[in-house]
Image (tube, rainbow, N blue to C red):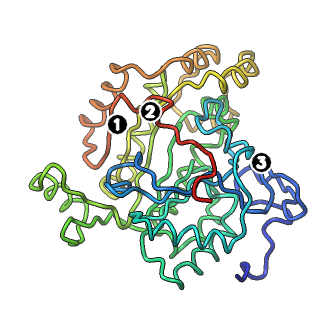
Amino acid sequence: MKQMKNHNFYDNCMLCPRTCGAQRSKGKNGICGVTETLKVARAALHFWEEPCISGTKGSGAVFFSGCALHCVFCQNESIAQGTAGKEITPERLVEIFLELQEKGANNINLVTPTHFVPLIVPALRAAKREGLRIPIVYNTSSYEKVSTLQLLDGLVDIYLPDLKYESPALSGLLSNAPDYFETATAAIAEMVRQVGEPVFAAPDGTLLLAAQMNDACEEADEDAEFLMKKGVIVRHLALPGQEADSKRVLSYLLKTYGERIYISLMNQYTPIPSVLEKTLPKLTQKKLAAPEPLREKSAAQPESAQACLTGLQRRLTEDEYEALIDFAIENGIENGFIQDQETAQESFIPAFDGEGI
């Protein structure tokens, strides 16, 4: 398989906003925790995405090892740190894509793929030449460089980005990324530019735009399946005690995109004691403040770091989540998804045991 021409992205890695410059081509780990060699922790049918992504047959999720964001509350810490997973060749990645399609996957779901984009691009092209025809989903924290996303233009059908925070103080504390909001919103704008407005397939194969989709769902049987074929679903994970920041995120998305995207309001935050015991003690003395240029762009009212960190040790309450749902409805958000309270459990976190690799 041919590599992407004219540039070795891994000699001095600048693929993500961390721009760590690691010599990943020489076996050095980037801030993402991995070298240039593909590393995958799981490749299997996944049933816990939004209904239009997983459907009844499942999403063909490929969980890549490594992550550049390193949120202190990460539920997938073992793969985010690059410790879990198996190294594979680009040729094997092509086979995995085709195997997932053969198993009946509704799509190929690339989970945390940023640091491997230069290898994923030729693998997708090769798989398409060999008969891959299901949609490609790019599942990301949104801490992305627009230039990296542009390498995927024409290859990705559905973007599934997070928008985690509006407050630079909060993102600085919890993800060491005070520039998260401005970086993520620029990335999401590029995603929307690439794939346009949402398109769904009805059970009979008819393609529907968002407005048609809503009417069709009301008329269809309760178990009718409508699968997304193209578009952007922006996810927001509501955090305990951070209702004001969540409302700012939702307001931004509605004002900026209206019905051109779907919003997934998630309540699945699950405190993982083994993770928090390692990360929280390091942060208790840290000030909750953003750099001055970013502080001026945010309406966030700082609170103590200790209050934020204490909140992370519990789940989101039903009242907190209901308040955000009410806010979304009252402000006119119609195209979206909400979650059952039962999803905030460790049992919903996949086993990163090398399945399908």
Q: Tell how many labels.
A: 3
Q: Nearer the viewer, residue 215 or 332?
A: 215
Query: Mark 1 — residue?
Result: 339
Disc 2, disc 3: CB below 8 Å? no
The N terminus, quarter of image = bottom right
The extreme right residue here reads 26
Residue at image x 41%, y 45%? 48
In the picture, measured across the screen, residue 154 lies left or right of residue 76, that is: left
Q: Secondary structure at mark 1?
A: loop
Q: Are marks 3 and 1 in contact (CB under 8 Å)?
A: no
User: What's under tag 1, amino acid-wise?
Assistant: Gln
Disc number at residue 268? 2
Indicate the amino acid at tag 3: Gly
Q: Nearer the viewer, residue 61 or 313?
A: 61
* Quadrant in which residue 201 is drawn: bottom left
Measure the alpha-carbon separation of dots 3 and 1: 31 Å
Does the CB distance between marks 1 and 2 fall below 8 Å? yes
In-front residue for pair 249/149: 149
Residue type marked 2: Gln
What numbered label is drawn on residue 33? 3
